[in-house]
Image: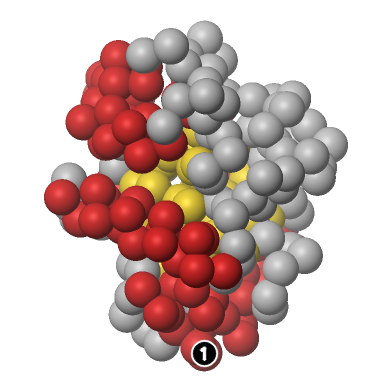
Amino acid sequence: MSIKKQLKLYFIMGSNNTGAVEPLNVLEAALQGGVTCFQLREKGDGALIGEAKREFAQQCQQLCQRYSVPFIINDDVELAMAVDADGVHVGQDDMDAGRVRERLGSNKILGVSTHTLEEVQQALADGADYVGMGPVYATMSKADAKPVAGTGLIRKTASLHPDLPIVGIGGITLDNFEPVIQAGASGVSLISAIASADDPFATAQKFAATIEEIIQREGASS
């Protein structure tokens, strides 16, 4: 499966994102519902560290493998290499993406968060397989979130780099994600929309079906 297809419904979660609900249950429900990529983002208050983080990562990885979904780790190259994750995602304030690519080698997925065209160019030079863009809308999931960006950068980047997989992130819900795909994103990244959902399975299923409808419709009209 191509990276673009793998990014269609990209779930991001840490052990501290699901409230009182067991996070592994949320992840499995999301995978059953149609999530196409998963990123472990273990950051913030109450985040696991050390051996507990590694153990949780391996449990998440096993679930992803069961459903044949790529397992990406956020900003922890050592852990990604230790558990043989499918890839790493880094932000602009994390380890330099070029160094991450050197450490990972060429056969792992590298994603980079970008907020400007210059950062997109640098990510490409560093060997990124895809870029994340946002926050598209206001978000409460990240304490360090950048100012709201809308879909303008996605549209510009998709025009300049039509083969580059782009995933939109930030405040995305079932009610507002269609413009993200229409702007040229390959998919959407979700944290709270699934992690905090009353029914993660049904929510993921609805996202997956709607994204497919939009992609089919956009393809037919182009």
Instruction: Tell me what residue is drawn at x 67 percent, y 45 percent.
Output: 46
Instruction: Tell me what residue is drawn at x 29 percent, y 42 percent.
Output: 36
Q: Quadrant of residue 176?
A: top right
Q: Quadrant of residue 98?
A: bottom right
Q: Quadrant of residue 99?
A: bottom right
| Residue 157: % across, % down | 60, 50
Left or right: 53 as drawn, with respect to 211: right
Residue extending farthest right: 147
Q: Nearer the viewer, residue 18 or 71?
A: 18
| Residue 72: % across, % down | 42, 59
Answer whether residue 3 is visible to the viewer in this image. no
Q: Nearer the viewer, residue 19 or 170?
A: 19
Is the residue 193 above or below the residue 153 in the image?
above
Q: Which residue is mark 1?
A: 102
| Residue 195: % across, % down | 48, 28
Is the residue 180 above or below the residue 59 in the image?
above
Q: How many marks?
A: 1
Q: Residues within 10 Å of mark 1 (few under 14, many from 20)?
A: few
Left or right: 67 as drawn, with respect to 176: left
Left or right: 72 as drawn, with respect to 31: right
Instruction: Tell me what residue is drawn at x 57 percent, y 69 percent.
Output: 50
Answer whether residue 58 is visible to the viewer in this image. yes
